[in-house]
Amino acid sequence: MKMITAVIKPFKLEEVREALADCGVTGLTVTEVKGFGRQKGHTELYRGAEYVVDFLPKVKVEVVVRTEDVERCVDAIVGAARTGKIGDGKIFVTAVERVVRIRTGDLDEAAV
């Protein structure tokens, strides 16, 4: 099993959720986060004063899938989240050693 963590633009969340649902993903976790990449934030003008926004709002989507489903899910996220502009985000894929469903005690793939 693998965990896919995608950091995306907030307005792309619904499209990513739908794309993952089409891949057969039945559950995911979403967290509102802030961060920056190569663009190092940006400047904004508010009431005539310019100020620097160091951390940009993003959304982190986490989903655990079977190893054989990783490429299909990653491709779906990329297709749904891409705008072609700087700051589209990143996807990280990491190994998951064990999963336990608290309510039933199901383990690993049965718990996902």
Image: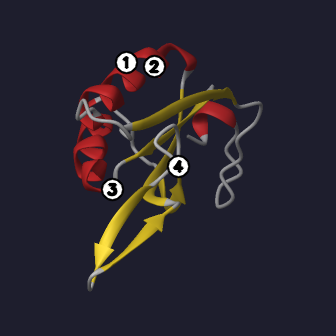
Element under label 4? loop
Q: Earlier in the sequence, mark 3 or mark 2?
A: 3
Q: Earlier in the sequence, mark 4 or mark 2?
A: 4
How much space separates mark 1 and mark 2, taking CA atoms?
6 Å
Instruction: Answer whether labels 3 and 2 touch (C-beta < 8 Å).
Output: no
Mark closer to the observer (1, 3): 3
Name the foreground residue: 7 vs 72. 7
Mark 1–mark 3 distance (CA, rounded to whole Å) = 22 Å
Q: Label 3: state its secondary structure.
A: helix
Lateral position of residue 71 relative to residue 88, left or right: right
- Residue 40 in the image: state x and y as whole percent: 51, 47
Res 78 quadrant in image: top left
Image coordinates of residue 96 in percent, x first then y, are 71, 31
Give the CA distance from mark 3 to mark 4: 14 Å
Q: Which residue is mark 4?
A: 36
Amino acid type of the residue tagged 2 in the rendering: Asp
